Amino acid sequence: MSGKRTFTMIKPDAVESGNIGNILQMISNAGFSIKAMKFTQLSEERAKAFYAVHAERPFYGELVDYMSSGPIVAAILEKDNAVEDFRTLIGSTDPAEAAEGTIRKKYAESKGRNAVHGSDSDENAQIEGEFHFDANEVI
Ligand code: UDP
Ligand code: MG
């Protein structure tokens, strides 16, 4: 059975372009509730660790530099079928391929600077949530 929680980040490009509020509104309108949230910035070391699964990919260095380049918003979200429904809400990795009305279609700049992160499985949602939040920070 699919789980009720997922993990997201509003990435540095979307924070810099002033879209935190717009993106949170879309997340709320889609029926997600916030169980934890913080405004923070990843160090280079923490960005490397978060994206360690991509360490062998050609874009890893650029991804780490970008994700540590400015503040982000990290959040744990709750909804039935959270992981899959949130991936639908954010759209394809590349905004050029993302469906109309998705967060990435509206706010992403490029395949790399793509406005938001969304966990790809229940297991990773749990791991990524714990990467950013202590148990006492989660409602
Ligand atoms: N990324 C990139 N170039 C690529 C693929 C991915 O810069 O060709 C970046 C992009 O920011 C993406 C992140 O790496 O969101 C993680 O990639 P993944 O394939 O997991 O995409 P996502 O799950 O975020 O859609
Ligand atoms: Mg991914």
Image: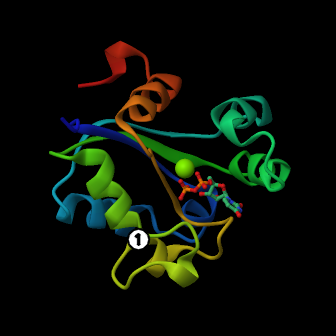
**Which residue is painted at 68% across and 65% down in the image?**
112
x then y, percent, for residue 117: 50, 52
**Disc 1: which residue:** 103
Query: In the displayed structure, would residue 53 be above or below residue 23?
Result: above
x then y, percent, for residue 121: 40, 40
Query: In the displayed structure, would residue 73 be above or below residue 46?
Result: below
Q: Mark 1, residues whose alpha carbon is within 10 Å: few (<14), some, or many (≥20)?
A: many
Point out the quarter of the image occupied by ligand 1: bottom right
Query: In the displayed structure, would residue 115 be above or below residue 107?
Result: above
> Is residue 31 shown left or right of residue 46?
left
Residue most extreme to the front? 1
> Is residue 39 shown left or right of residue 88?
right
**Which residue is painted at 18% across and 65% down in the image?**
29
**Which residue is painted at 84% across and 54% down in the image?**
58
x then y, percent, for residue 67: 69, 49
Rendering quarter of residue 134:
top left
Question: Amino acid under label 1?
Answer: Ile
Q: Quadrant of the N terminus?
A: top left
Q: Quadrant of the C terminus?
A: top left
**Which residue is painted at 32% across and 47% down in the image?**
83
Rendering quarter of residue 114:
bottom right
Rendering quarter of residue 79:
top left
**Which element is circle 1 on?**
helix
| In front of the other: 118 or 70 | 118
> Is residue 75 shown left or right of residue 30?
right
| In front of the other: 44 or 123 | 123
